[in-house]
């Protein structure tokens, strides 16, 4: 998976210059975000119902649920996991999908460059994972 984001630079002669950068994202980086978010960073605001997407997950084997979710997101562009509000389990806040993850990472690079830098260095913590997960699911930071 690759992520493209734009950087804007201002100079005295140019009002704006657009630079697009493509960054290669590995399966391990995606797993780090999803596992960190679902197992700690975001569990104060989200709820998932495994029955909604279990048929689209890879076989259990010896993988934890969060690892199976991250593998599905990385390898299956059609995978789409509904994410609900923990306080209102009928309220779908958005979806975890490969397309939304790409959007979330692009928003992170643009609006939270320090978090994106730690992501590219595979050094995120649970708080960073929460930011990326919220941007992925909802397109903005809503909680925390």
Image (cartoon, rainbow, N blue to C red):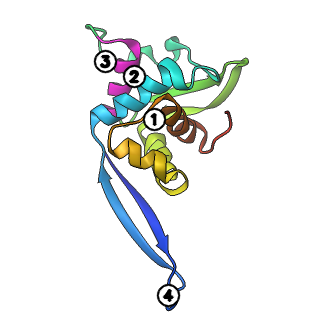
Residue 58: image tag: 3
**Which of the two discs, 2 and 3, sits closer to the camera?**
2
Tell me the residue at 56%/42% (across/down): 135
**Which of the two discs, 4 and 2, sits closer to the camera?**
4
Give SS at disc 1: strand
**Main SS of the magenta segment?**
helix
- Above/below status of 18 relative to 120: below
Question: Residue 122: horizontal and vertical position, in percent?
Answer: 33, 38
Question: Residue 63: horizontal and vertical position, in percent?
Answer: 30, 12
Q: Quadrant of residue 72?
A: top left
Q: Quadrant of the C terminus?
A: top right
3D distance between C-alphas at marks 4 and 2: 45 Å
3D distance between C-alphas at marks 3 and 1: 15 Å
Question: Residue 16: horizontal and vertical position, in percent?
Answer: 51, 80
3D distance between C-alphas at marks 3 and 4: 50 Å
Tell me the residue at 43%/59% (across/down): 5
- Of residue 66 and residue 59, the one placed in the foreground of this image is 66
**Which of the two discs, 1 and 4, sits closer to the camera?**
4
Residue bearing the label numbered 4: 14
Visible in this render: residue 79? Answer: no
3D distance between C-alphas at marks 2 and 3: 8 Å
- Above/below status of 9 relative to 82: below
Residue count near mark 3 (Cα–Cα under 10 Å), binned few <14, some 14–19, many ≥20: some
The numbered mark, 2 or 3, whose residue comes first in the sequence reads: 3
Question: Residue 101: horizontal and vertical position, in percent?
Answer: 45, 40
Visible in this render: residue 124? Answer: yes
The numbered mark, 1 or 4, whose residue comes first in the sequence reads: 4
Residue bearing the label numbered 2: 69
Tell me the residue at 45%/35% (across/down): 97
3D distance between C-alphas at marks 1 and 2: 10 Å
Give SS at disc 2: helix
Is residue 68 found left or right of 96 in the rendered image? left
């Amino acid at each position: 998976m690759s992520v493209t984001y734009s950087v804007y630079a201002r100079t005295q002669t140019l009002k704006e210059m657009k630079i697009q950068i493509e960054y290669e994202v590995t399966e391990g980086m995606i797993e780090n975000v999803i596992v960190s978010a679902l197992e700690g960073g975001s569990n104060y605001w989200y709820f998932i119902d495994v029955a909604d997407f279990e048929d689209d997950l890879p076989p259990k084997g010896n993988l934890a649920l969060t690892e199976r979710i991250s593998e599905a997101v990385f390898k299956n562009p059609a995978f789409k996991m509904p994410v609900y509000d923990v306080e209102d389990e009928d309220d779908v806040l958005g979806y975890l999908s490969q397309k939304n993850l790409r959007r979330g990472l692009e928003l992170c690079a643009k609006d939270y460059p320090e978090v994106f830098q730690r992501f590219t260095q595979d050094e995120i913590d649970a708080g960073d994972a929460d930011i990326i997960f919220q941007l992925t699911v909802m397109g903005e930071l809503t909680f925390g």
